[in-house]
Image: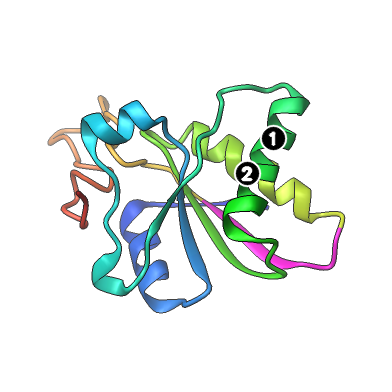
Amino acid sequence: MVENINSKEAFDLLRKDENALLIDVRTKKEHLAVGIPDLKEIGKETHLIEWKNSIFPVYQKHFVNDINENLGLRDEGKYIFICRSGIRSNFAALTVEESFDSGNYNVRCFNVEDGFEGNEQHLGYPQKLTGWKNLGLPWK
């Protein structure tokens, strides 16, 4: 089951667990326009693997293949997925988790539910800042 975590929890997990990876599923245009998480201070890199915004199985299979080609097939670890607001990354995490269900893997998938840019919260005052960038976590 994919676990939803916020940006701060994701950064803490990446810092504490050497087997945790961050996968940014946004487009190249988004990376250029608003930046990406910068993990060099904790000795890691952000893996940029685009989710093609599709619910069609053929595209999901391509995404899983992209994950395997870029990260290698790991039998254990934590995959943390991030996008702008937590929606695409949730689909990506569910897709990857499902691909591991058929094997003997000890892999957990996480979705950064507040995303890189954060979610607008209209119901509460004062407005609560969310998202990797808004919380001041490292980015470039």
In the structure shown, which secondary structural element does the residue marked by tag 2 occupy? helix
Q: Is residue 104 left or right of residue 63?
A: right
Contact (CB < 8 A) between labels 1 and 2? yes
Image quarter of residue 78:
bottom right
Depicted 50 relative to depicted 65: above or below: above
Image quarter of residue 46:
bottom left
x%, y% of residue 1?
A: 68, 53
x%, y% of residue 95?
A: 68, 41
- Which one is in front, 104 or 45? 45
What's the distance in space between the residues labelled 1 and 2, CA to CA?
Answer: 6 Å
Depicted 51 relative to depicted 114: above or below: above
- In the picture as drawn, the residue positioned furthest to the left comes out as 126
**Residue drawn at x 18%, y 44% as measured from the top left:** 134
In the structure shown, which secondary structural element does the residue marked by tag 1 occupy? helix
Would you say residue 39 sits in the magenta stretch? no
Badge 1: few (under 14), some or many (20 or more) residues near its Cα, within 10 Å? few
Amino acid type, mark 1: His
**Residue drawn at x 16%, y 34% as measured from the top left:** 127
Instruction: Specify the color scheme.
Output: rainbow
Would you say residue 108 sits in the magenta stretch? yes
Q: Main secondary structure of the magenta part?
A: strand
Q: Is residue 33 left or right of residue 69?
A: left
Badge 2: few (under 14), some or many (20 or more) residues near its Cα, within 10 Å? some
- In the picture as drawn, the residue positioned furthest to the front comes out as 69
x%, y% of residue 104?
A: 84, 68
Give the labeled residue for mark 1.
Answer: 62
Q: Is residue 53 left or right of residue 44?
A: right
Q: Is residue 105 left or right of residue 53?
A: right
Amino acid type, mark 2: Asp
Give the labeled residue for mark 2.
Answer: 66
x%, y% of residue 133?
A: 21, 45
Looking at the rendering, the stretch of residues picked out in magenta corresponds to: 103-110
